[in-house]
Image (spheres, rainbow, N blue to C red):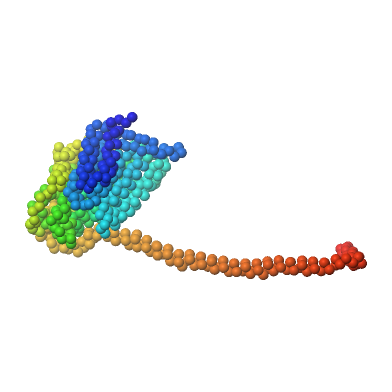
Amino acid sequence: MLKYTDILPLMILFLPLVGGILSYLVPNKRSGLIAVITATLILVYSVSAFFYIPFETGLDLDWITAGNQVFQVGLYYDQISGIMCIVVAIVALLVSIFSLEYMKHDAAQPRYFALLGLFAFSMYGIVLSSNLLLTFIFWELVGFSSYLLIGFWFEKAAPPISSFKAFLMNKVGDVGFLLGIFILFAYFKTLNIQLLIGVDPSQSGIPNSLLITMGIGLFLAAVGKSAQFPLQTWLPDAMTGPTPVSALIHAATMVAAGVYLMVRIFPLLVPEVLTVIGIIGGITAFMGAFAAFAQNDIKKILAYSTVSQLGYMIMAVGAGFPVAAFVHLTTHAFFKAGLFLCSGSIIHYYHETNHDHDFDAQDITNMGGLRKVLPVTFLAFTLCMLALAGLPLFSGFLSKEMILNGLASSQLPSFVVVFGFASVFMTAAYMARLYFKVFFNGGEQKERYTEALVIKAPLTVLSLLSLGFVFSANPINPDSSWLQPLLSSFNGSAVAQHFSLIPVLSIALALAGLAFSYFYIEKKMFEGFVNGIKTLAYSVSNKNFYLDEIYKVAIVRGALLLAKAAYWWDQKVVDRVVNLIGEAQVVVAYLTGWFDRTVVDGGVKLLTWTVNFAGNRTRQMQGGNLQAYLAWAVFGLLLIFYFFELLIG
């Protein structure tokens, strides 16, 4: 019989799916209301579960029996799954409320809120799954639901292409996920995560080469889902979906799934794999921050920022500090969701007040002076931006300091540590550029506008959740966070050595980045310096290091060349060989026909003629004349005697 502690996770898991189905079936105006009610109930259940369900509680059921093997499905509740459920529930609820206003003119609201429910169901499945097989199933459902949400406006040209690109790149990572699962099951005969991480990899009996292969395979899944180098190009293009979708999926939840997986299976990762993870994370953090500089699309800037911050989290895992990665995942979810919803508020404002179809409501060069027109959005953006920059008194400072201390304590290559600190300056600089261009630069907007309550409320909550006091009574000391003791018993957890110089350097870099963009945008200083840099690096930043172009040359064109070579081989070699074989068969058939007609049929006809001729001649001897019979008998005897004479002689 199911207990209350079993029912709560089941409610968290399946209620989004039920809510999504109901949202799809009801009339257009009520679908959003059902989504909000469902999201509220899930948040209540998630908070209740955190206080009432003992950590490390599991529920497993047999699913498939194949010979002697039994595959199970089950749920597992511990510290990180409990916190993650609350984070997803908060963001999902606020996004649903925001969507009431943002999507009010869209006729496809039922489909939109139904897809949000499907996505939430899939995401909670990843968070609560007790084994890798069930995790993989929900992993695929998350990819599928995000594919549908990115391409939600499928009647336009860009969304279907972006959704297919995201889906395809995630499939590359999924191949690695399957490889890791196959290796683990082949050696351990189980995919239960707690049983797997309870085994010391060095004592597991698996060859080290296979441990490395398994770890790289599982990390490849995170590379695809969490947009790490070299598969990060899908995330900026995914901004073609509705902005609330970007806030939910591409800032707080889906892209965090890869980081969550790495944190969950951290004890399975051998040092060689952790080094690769740290290097990839460092490269991703630097490339994402650098690419954000030359973008003019407000959502793409935030998307590249997300890529960079995900690189930070992956760096922390590679450095050996998964708890730091998870804490940054938690803080980032709130302030980045807040930034995306702020961008949605700005875009919505332009859609409501500007009816020029050629006007690009996402281009920051068309914006300016919005601080008085959208005061709540301005204040929320300010707080969330400062949290992203990692300044004291904000949540981003706490989690980023944990990561930077971890990097300084790690054995990762020096350039990874340099990338980590350089990204602090770049993050503050590109966000300040966006901030001043949108809210200050360009003069005051003339048209008055009243922000809707369902837009202001989510922005206010997310901006408050970006304050350091939410996570620590002492918002300038990362070690005082309430998350630290809660996660201290988590498998593989470690506390980095605290370096007093790290926060000083981090704050200095962040302030330098903010000041640089302020003087450049507002005071028109450093123009010569910036123009010189633009000449060398603008196109590299704007094109994201030409990764898409490299893919087009190396993969798309390579595939086309391979297809052309295969076509040439088929036409010039295979078809010619087939034609020659056909012609040879015709010749052989002609010769066979001639032989059959001339030799076989001729032989048969000759034999027939001979028998007929002999029959005609012998028939003449049967004339009924006794004397003739006697003469032939004597003649035959003479022949017989002559024959024997020859044999004897």
Total marks placed: 0
Residue 263 location (% of width, % of height) = 29, 42
Asked whether the viewer can see residue 97, the reply is yes
**Residue 589 drawn above or below residue 517:** below
Q: Nearer the viewer, residue 310 or 175?
A: 175
Asked whether the viewer can see residue 466, the reply is no
Give the image quarter of residue 612: bottom right
Residue 220 location (% of width, % of height) = 33, 49
Furthest-front residue in this view:
624
Q: Is residue 132 left or right of residue 377?
A: right
Give the image quarter of residue 458: top left
Residue 485 location (% of width, % of height) = 22, 35
Give the image quarter of residue 648: bottom right
Q: Residue at x 40, y 44 (%)?
A: 183
Q: Nearer the viewer, residue 334 or 402?
A: 334
**Residue 65 drawn above or below residue 588:** above
Quadrant where the N terminus sits is top left
Q: Residue at x 19, y 57 (%)?
A: 297
**Residue 245 drawn above or below residue 572:** above
Q: Nearer the viewer, residue 627 or 579?
A: 627
Residue 279 location (% of width, % of height) = 28, 50
Q: Residue at x 90, y 67 (%)?
A: 625
Quadrant where the C terminus sits is bottom right
